[in-house]
Image (cartoon, coloured by chain):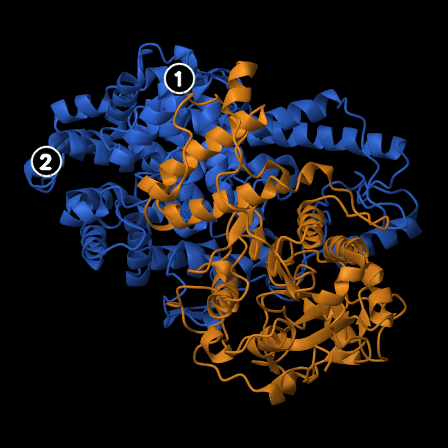
Amino acid sequence: MKNRIVSRSLVVVGACLPFVGAQHAAPLQSAMPGPTLTPQDSALHALNRLAYGPRPGDVARVAAEGVMRWIDRQLSPDGIDDDRLIERERQFQILKYDRGDLAAMYTAAERERRERKLAAGQTADGSDSVGGQHAVPLPKQADPMIQKSNRLASEFADLAVARATLSERQLYEIMVDCWTNHFNVYAAKGADRFLTPDYIEHTIRPRAMGKFQDLLIATARSPAMLFYLDNWESVAPGSVPPTGLHVRARPIFGRRPGLFGPVRDPARQDSVRRRALERMPNGVNENYARELLELHTLGVDGGYTQHDVIDVARIFTGWSIERPQQGGDVEFHDWAHDRGEKLVLGVWFEGGHDMDEGIRLLKLLANHPATMHHVSRKLCQRFVNDDPPDGCVDDAVAAWERSSGDMREVLRAIFHGPDFWAAANVRAKVKTPLEFVVSAARAVAAEPDTSPRLAQVVARLGEPLFLHVAPDGYPEREAAWVNSGALLDRMNAAMALASGKLPGVTVVLDSLVPVGDADQLSGAVNEKILGGTMSENTKQVLRRELGGIGDPVQARALAVGLAIGGPEFQRQ
Amino acid sequence: MSISRRVFVKSGGLALVSLGLDPLFLERAAFASYRRLPFITAQSRPILVCLFQRGAVDGLNMIVPHGDPIYYQERPRIAVPEKDVLDLDGYFGLHPRLAALKPLWEAKTLAAIHAIGSPDATRSHFDAQDYMESGTPGVKATPDGWLNRYCQHDREHQDTPFRAVAFGPQLPRILAGTAPSLAIDDLQAFGLRAPQPAARDRLTRAFEELYAGSATGLLSTSSREAFDAVQMLKRLDPGQYRPANGADYPRGRLGKALLEIAQLIKADVGLQVAFADVTGWDTHVNQGATEGQLAGRLSEMGEALAAFTRDVGERMRDVVVLTMSEFGRTVRENGSSGTDHGHATAMLVLGGPVNGGRVLGKWPGLDPAQRFEGRDVAVTTDFRDLFAELLARHLGARDLSAIFPGFTPDPARFPGAISA
């Protein structure tokens, strides 16, 4: 199948959510926000957790609709019109290319880089000349392919931020972010430079609110994951490609092309083939197997052993990529597969099987009690509390069992449970950098233009999207994000946004916070941006600081900047 | 630090941010520091700099046991050839791309500890890093890190916000806890931004008041530490820093972090514990030998440490740098010319107080019978014995059992990294 990256359509989402709307109309009224929350409070809480914060007017709209009804609609994203986002997505060039196109562009850019380096007197493999001094700075003016390749790479992070900011299907976008981190790949590792956009578009997004098992199998089969965790070159010890098969060593990114191409001189040909064979994988690589058990499914305390890791790795031997340099798809190498018997978590996998035993294993893992608990707990951590109460995790696990891992049902159980609405969990979480930036943009109805820079702000605050190098994804707990430097950075970002100094982002405050005296500004900011959560201290500080400023536009910018950069807005 | 104790300039309004301000207003509004700056006295306090090689460095290719034929048998494609190894003691040698560190070895200010690691058998990066930073292998519930606990229990340096600093966008687990510690990603950009100093000061004060009165939990403590540091940094002018003695830091995060650490050391702001991350060690594929992936990372680290040593100069007499990594890698190379997760690794200590020129620790050998679970270098030195030695003999910590709960540090087991 030729995977063309297109903007998300109703068709794609609908395809994996076949029964939306019909099945679960009944429990709508069954659970209620706790008695301590007003309709506005509960609307704000839901918008903070199931969405990237409210836009102007959202709290009143959700309260008027009824928060449980709004939540139910968010659980069926295919029923929500998202025309404005679809319109915006058309402006992103990255969606017009498939992974083969991106691979070709990347290769061309690399060739330009190499040629320029050669011209600058350096070796072609990117290493420095002898002496160990660092590289001579390259001229500023980059070649067209390099520019294009760089632009597309950054555009993909911009797209993620634009979707989070603009989409009406807010819960869906949050689930995409959850799974992007749960099944993390590092977009700066070799072929993942051009495989990652396809991975997000066609592996994660269509399954973000479907069955966990489908998502797990899709990630296992994705070239991006096969490359990232090295499984694509995990082979049974001693296996050799059948004769006649062109010996293809792993691509070495940045190396001279044609090193292993056809060579005329027989002696040299022999040596080239020998060197290529030396580079060929000749055994098992445990990387994917371990992270599959530890991070994707069972959890580190899920009861597996080193022996399980090895046999899982054996089961996945031969799961490879067809021409990774060209952005190829998953390819099963029969000759590289370990056909012996395996024992995983006490379950025998008899010998003689192919790719089917990997699928069988993934199904076993997807529905394992440890997986249900591990993944449910992560979801509760995201939606309820950094240290989620056992009750909501148990509810989520029960819904998982009932629905065979339908994520909509798991989420529904969390949102209908008492813990979600408990006063102790309201505003109990600190926003991640992505949540902070997107919620700030939404709060002031900021309009990211065609070259939005919000993704760069997210990166500066510590969360460069798709660039978390380790397989655990970005952390959820506040301790990972709250520190002295990060808070100062958030204050600076808030002031820049409020004073219209973020390039690529248009902020028009007139209709949101009209100019006025200190009391008026403080009141408007409290109501419109902080949802009425402004503390007495903040009111005093705002009044004092705004009081003597002559220029009303400056006073307003300061009021908005202090509100967004201040402590109340860091929580959700 | 309640608001009532602060002196406010109530009249005159606030000079605004970056929005083109009236200079007269600025002049009128400019005010002196509203808090007494801490006074740093001691010029020669001991300093510990920790580098965490995240991803598990292959200790066997960093400090190479070239005297053992098993090393070459097990690694036909990735062993560092005998001719390239920089011999240290006839059995071990430095990876050739760590050549920048060889002079420190000759000067006996660099030592290696081999076969060091955790008593816990986990091969999970995340658990193993967690244990190495909490200082409690096998116990996940420990709320704080061991460097932070050191700061909690030795209180004599609490006069400065710069006592414990992590360089990077996140505060690492090792410094998490109740003792103040800073996270600085970029020293030059640390603080509120505004074109004029007076506007910046007033904006800083406004945010400080917001957080002092309205923040709770971690938001409250972190912001207080931030504003204390901002106040002190005003004197430093970090943009003007030039490395001394022709030190040439390699580009990249590590070089920048070490440069900023050197800068804080020389600025005498009371830095005692510094921390930085170095990534890129998880070499499952195509690890390389004399050249290649691991060689590139080692080269950057060696050059950065050499530049740091040159830059800090004389003051290295007070400084110890420690490299650590969550575990080592398999003795045998894997199917893709890389190595998988193993057990023991090697760590480096360098600096004036170091008992250098030696590979420390008991070497268990590479014979399969001597390996951990038949595949990895066995741990013969508990990492806590090395960390405890540095805390006790270098920083002068007194209560080690409070820093490493459930562990009884015994000087008899210290590897001997610090000169007597």
Image quarter of residue A149 = top right
Depicted A376 relative to depicted A561: above or below: below
In the visual, does A409 lie left or right of A443?
left
Mark closest to the chain's N terminus, 2 or 1: 2
Above or below, A265 against A306 in this view is above
User: Residue at label 2?
Assistant: A28
- Helix, strand or loop at mark 2: helix
Quadrant of the drawing holding the C terminus of chain B: bottom right
Amino acid at circle 2: Leu
Task: Say what amino acid the circle numbered 1 marks.
Answer: Ala
Where in the figure is residue A442, as x and y percent of width and height? 35, 24
Chain of the residue that carries numbered disc 2 in the rendered image? A
Residue at (78, 58) in percent of width and height: B309
Q: Which residue is mark 1?
A: A555
Q: Residues within 10 Å of mark 2 (few under 14, many from 20)?
A: some
Is residue A239 rendered to the left or right of residue A7? right
Q: Residue at x 29, y 35 (%)?
A: A537
In the figure, the shade used to draw chain A is blue
B417 and B270: which is toward the camera: B270
Write down the colour of chain B.
orange
- Look at the numbered disc 1 and give the secondary structure of its residue: helix
Query: Quick check: marks 2 and 1 in contact, CB under 8 Å?
Result: no
Q: Looking at the picture, how far across and down is residue B281, in whole percent?
A: 65, 58
Which chain does the numbered disc 1 sit on? A
Foreground: disc 2 or disc 1 = 1
Count neighbours of disc 1 (C-alpha within 10 A) and say few if under 14, some if 14 to 19, many if 20 or more: many
**Residue B287: x percent and y percent?**
71, 58
Disc 2 to disc 1, C-alpha distance: 45 Å
Q: Is residue A15 visible?
A: no
Give the camera-side residue of B232 and B37. Answer: B37
